[in-house]
Image (tube, grey):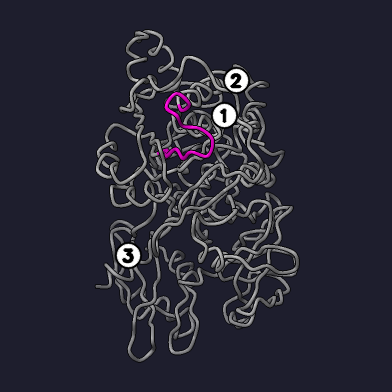
Amino acid sequence: MNLVHHVADAAAERGDAPALVYDGQETSYETFWTRAGQFAAGLAEHGIGVDDRVAVYLPNLPQFVTAFHGTLRAGGVVVPMNPQYKRRELRHLLGDSGAKAVVTLPGLVQHVDAVREETDVNVVVTVDESESESESESESESESESERESEREGDADSRFEAFLADETRPVADRADEDIAVQPYTSGTTGTPKGVLLTHHNLAWDADAATNPIPDGIRPDDRHLGVLPLFHIYGMTVTMNATLFDGGSYYPLPTWDATAAASLVESAGLTLIHAVPAMYNDLANLPDDAEFDLSSVRFANSGGSGLPEEVRRSFEGRFGVELCEGYGLTETSPVTHANHVGNRRPGSIGTPLDGISARIVDDEFVDRPPVERGPVEEGSVDLDEITGELVVAGPNVMKGYYERPEANAAAFTEADGKRWFHTGDIGYADEDGFFYVVDRKKHMINTAGYNVYPREIEELLFEHPAVSDAAVVGIPDERRNETVKAFVVPIPDADVTEDEIREYCLERLAAYKHPREVVFVKELPRTTTGKVQKFHLESELTG
């Protein structure tokens, strides 16, 4: 089944109800679904159809949602791309995917044009960022038919409204295992790989990801759309899950804590999914910035580990319970979640129903669970209880695009299941809660001891003068590696780097404390909030 059948059902039931609300302008389910059909027909007019790749190179705009579902309606494959990417990244993503069309902003066309001859792109569709879907509809009616036809007939670039056909196109038949979306891994440690996600992967996870929300997503829910739609977290958990269940999606194209809090308050938004860095920004809004977020009935954090101090600060300021979840691009993404009334701070939660999860050592032997987590510092040897988190389930990707060696390394067949190696190190407890200690590749080995950066980062966040922090391992002739901390102090903080080092030394085993501390203005992060530690290890360390 084509996963957009879920949206078709919602459109038939909801009709005039708002599917999208952008900049105060509502787009009904009926209008949105019609425009998605017109986009699908526009693709067909340009010879783009089943299995063809369409790159959506946009921020969170209503046209992203239309192009996404219009491409799937046509039977194509969506290749979502970060609008911050420039020609170097585009050269790889467009060339590797074989995308035939790109939907983007006028200001980004230059980057596409710079690499276009090296790719299969023959159509570029541009979106006016100031137009909402409802505004565009009325403007397109006044445009002469001859003008629209002339833009559609050639292979030349088209404006979004001219690209839309006069008629809609029915939903193309697709098998469950056919590819729907091909996002690319973030590429923080190497060349990004295309992830092959099927219609069943995405539809199943969009449905399952709503289980931690009390009563699921309701038709009267209004969902804050701050997570970028090019990323699987925003795509599945905010956009698709909301539209499948008939709620209203409120996209924001750029992250601004004040703007987000204002929108939640003014529009009475009920659901928030965001990354820890966003919750940290909200918690650290100026004291005189008073916002009422009482309309929020569920808030979830994902994308990276949620520091306990960030959770406490956000909950203390806004009185909204914050639940942590876990997932990866390769798992569509959600595999674990905490539930309201059944959460364990510091844990990524329990596996969603239908998903199997294990903690295994290098020989793929299960590590025994602890009695109850989280474990306290010094109470247990982490090396005795931790291993790699592996998962299996209907949301796990089909594989990496044209990467047989990567696929061989990513999966292990055992016990009748196909286990995906997440690359995350963690442990589990007897109640079924899982805990991620750190990324396998981020673990620091100093003088024969394993050090997990997240443990130190959690401590740093508790310091009253610290706004943000990240820890990496750097080469050391005597210890192999040593610990280095990069700290963003709060404005006008009266603290020194030596004080931070001593603070850690007093609270951690000696081999864990950062022997080097550097104050920085900000940490290099991806758009989804993950710290790009390779930048810290190379550029900042010289």
Q: Residue furthest bottom?
A: 478
- Residue designated by label 2: 17
Image quadrant in which you'd find residue 254 = top left
Percent of width and height locating residue 105: 33, 33
Query: Which residue is drawn at the image coordinates 29% and 47% (left, top)?
Result: 86
Is mark 1 in CB contact (under 8 Å) with mark 2? yes
Image quadrant in which you'd find residue 469 = bottom left
The kind of residue tagged 1 is Ser
Percent of width and height locating residue 29: 58, 22
- Name the front one of labels 1 and 3: 3
The kind of residue tagged 2 is Ala
User: In the picture provided, is 43 more to the left or to the right than 110?
Assistant: right
Q: Residues within 10 Å of mark 1 (few under 14, many from 20)?
A: many
How many marks overall? 3
Image quadrant in which you'd find residue 73 = top right
User: In the picture provided, is 159 more to the left or to the right than 456?
Assistant: left
Whichever of labels 3 and 2 marks the residue nearer the N terminus, that label is: 2
- Residue designated by label 3: 535
Query: Which residue is drawn at the image coordinates 45% and 23% (left, top)?
Result: 45
Q: Is residue 448 above or below residue 377?
A: below
Whichever of labels 1 and 3 marks the residue nearer the N terminus, that label is: 1
Local secondary structure at mark 3: helix
User: In the picture provided, is 290 more to the left or to the right than 312?
Assistant: left
- Residue designated by label 1: 248
The kind of residue tagged 3 is His
The part of the chain drawn in magenta is 43-56
